């Protein structure tokens, strides 16, 4: 009986993840589109995209979306490399990060 409750709960989490994944990816892409803005707002978009990817990486494989989690993990790793390799103007660096990240999805 305990196993049945676990399966029911896991199915609920899996369903929530499946229904939200498209909007999470869309939110991350929309944030990427806004990363070339100057000032504080660009930083907010970078953070939001990274958080969305991080959430997908962690939850996806746990609820049976291994390939989705792997793709998000690859995108997140590319994102981190781009963030660490910042050179030149901030606007140019953010554009470069966005291009690298979008290619991974």
Image (spheres, helix red, strand yellow):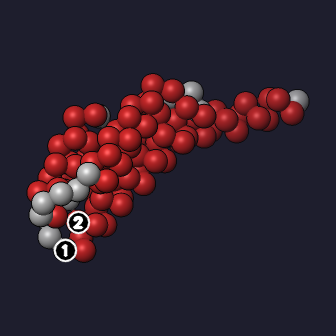
Foreground of the two, 21 or 40? 40
The vertical placement of 36 against 104, above or below, is below
Q: Quadrant of the C terminus?
A: top left
Kindly check if marks 2 and 1 are in contact, taking CB atoms under 8 A apart as contact. yes
Q: Quadrant of the N terminus?
A: top right
The vertical placement of 98 against 21, above or below, is below
Q: Which residue is drawn at 17% across and 43% down?
A: 99
Residue position for label 2: 42
Q: Quadrant of residue 41?
A: bottom left
The vertical placement of 68 against 37, above or below, is above
In percent of width and height, residue 103 lies at 22, 34
Left or right, residue 94 beside residue 8: left
Residue position for label 1: 39
How many numbered marks, from 0 up?
A: 2
Residue 30: give its label.
none
Decide: few, some or many residues near mark 2? Use Cα within 10 Å; few <14, some 14-19, many ≥20: many
Q: Residue at x 22, y 41 (%)?
A: 100
Q: Residue at x 31, y 66 (%)?
A: 44
Residue 7 appearing in the image: yes
Left or right, residue 100 beside residue 68: left
Q: Quadrant of residue 64?
A: top right
Foreground of the two, 52 or 46? 46
Q: Which residue lies furthest to the right in this view?
A: 1
Spatial CA span between label 2 and label 1? 6 Å
Decide: few, some or many residues near mark 1? Use Cα within 10 Å; few <14, some 14-19, many ≥20: few
Secondary structure at numbered mark 2: helix
In percent of width and height, residue 62 lies at 60, 34
Q: Which residue is drawn at 35% across and 48% down?
A: 80
């Amino acid at each position: 009986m305990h196993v049945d409750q676990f399966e029911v709960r896991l199915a609920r989490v899996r369903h929530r993840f499946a229904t939200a994944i498209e909007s999470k990816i869309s939110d991350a892409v929309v944030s990427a589109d806004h990363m070339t803005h100057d000032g504080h707002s660009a930083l907010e978009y970078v953070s939001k995209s990274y958080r969305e990817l991080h959430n997908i990486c962690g939850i996806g494989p746990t609820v049976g979306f291994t390939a989705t989690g792997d793709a998000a993990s690859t995108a997140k790793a590319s994102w981190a490399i781009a963030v660490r390799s910042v050179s030149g103007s901030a606007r140019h660096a953010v554009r470069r990060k966005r291009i690298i990240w979008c290619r991974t999805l």
